[in-house]
Amino acid sequence: MNINNHTHVYNFKKKINPSKFTVTQSEDDVVKSFYSNSYNLNTTSNEYGCQFIDAETTDYKKPHILLCIKDNAELLHFTLNNMKQNKIFDFANVLIIDDRSETDHIKTISLESDCSYMRVDNTANQFNFSMLHNLATHALKTKSPNLKDIILWSSDLWTNNPEMLPILYKKHTENKNTITGTKLLYPTKDFLYHKPDRADKVQYAGSMFGPRPGEAGLFALHMFRGYPKEDPKVNCDKGELFITAAFLIIDAEWYMKSGGFCPSLKASYQDVDLCLRANEQNQRVMYYGKELYLYHYENLILDTMKEDLKKDQLSDKLWYKGFWEPERIKNLLYVNET
């Protein structure tokens, strides 16, 4: 199923009032035909309602961290405290993107912590990682026409070193990267949330593209999961075809010109698609892991939504396989290796 001629992008040129606005977005679902084993594209229209409250301390000369969360106030409180302890707020603004939370706890914690706050609801009442970040970036760009970079920061991502983010951001800007990532480790017992059997081992440190058993297509595989953080294969700097969205520094101008994350990729593969598009456009996508790392629990929020996301994750996988056919990825693999 080739869907290269049937894709939807987000319109960052639409004029909005960032304090309160709505956006109607076309999105594709890949669904199995009732009469055969083939798959069809089903286009739907989803309306997003957004409310934005700027923190009084926002400094639009600083980069902006985008952190999405739904309902888990305890986790947000822990993550923001970790940021404060490691002086993240001295370096960057933090925008909390509240995805349809059922109470005002996320809003209260955000504003009390000197974060900007953006509430996003949608008529389909579904999680859409891509649209949450597209809408937030659109609002920030409207408020700050000179917006330079955005930093994606997972709600279960932490650090123990105040210098990590400034160093990574300096490498990103000085090397004129389009997308920058780093080594992610499973948290140690020093963190409230941790997996004892994986503590301080690699969660993400670059990827390789290859097949999955019983499936057609090429997928981004976390080949170094579980490696010691000092292993030469991960304790290095290198160009990458794919970097996980758990932590990304992205050139905001390129992100918006390229259409942002694909709205049809709601729950998965949006980071793979974005990085492959960047590589296809000869943009710099870099991994810095030489003595640099952050801690990532991995899917702490998404694991609570597994049943709700099954349908979207299947659609995302099928969409990705149709858009990024093996030969197209192989061409990038060859260029990346040479």
Image (cartoon, helix red, strand yellow):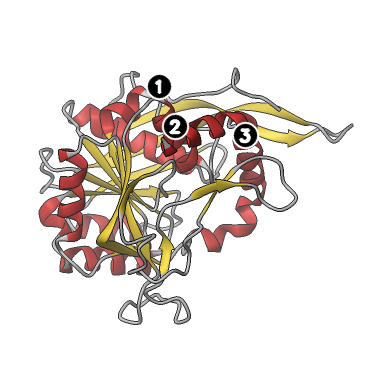
Residue drawn where x is 16% and y is 28% of the image: 146
Residue that mark 3 sits on: 326
Alpha carbon separation for disc pair 3 and 2:
14 Å
Residue that mark 1 sits on: 11
- In the image, what residue type sits under mark 1? Asn
* Mark linked to residue 132: none
For label 3, the SS is helix
Crowding at dot 1, Cα within 10 Å, few <14 / some 14-19 / many 20+, comes out as some
Judge left or right: residue 214 versus residue 84.
right
251 lies above or below 156: above
Residue that mark 2 sits on: 335
Q: Earlier in the sequence, mark 1 or mark 3?
A: 1
Alpha carbon separation for disc pair 1 and 3:
29 Å
Choose mark 1 or mark 3, whichever is in front: 3
- In the image, what residue type sits under mark 2? Val
- In the image, what residue type sits under mark 3? Pro
| Residue 51 x/y as whole percent | 33, 39
| Residue 141 x/y as whole percent | 24, 29
Check contact, mark 1 vs mark 2: CB within 8 A.
no
| Residue 260 x/y as whole percent | 40, 31
Instruction: Name the quadrant containing residue 16.
Output: top left
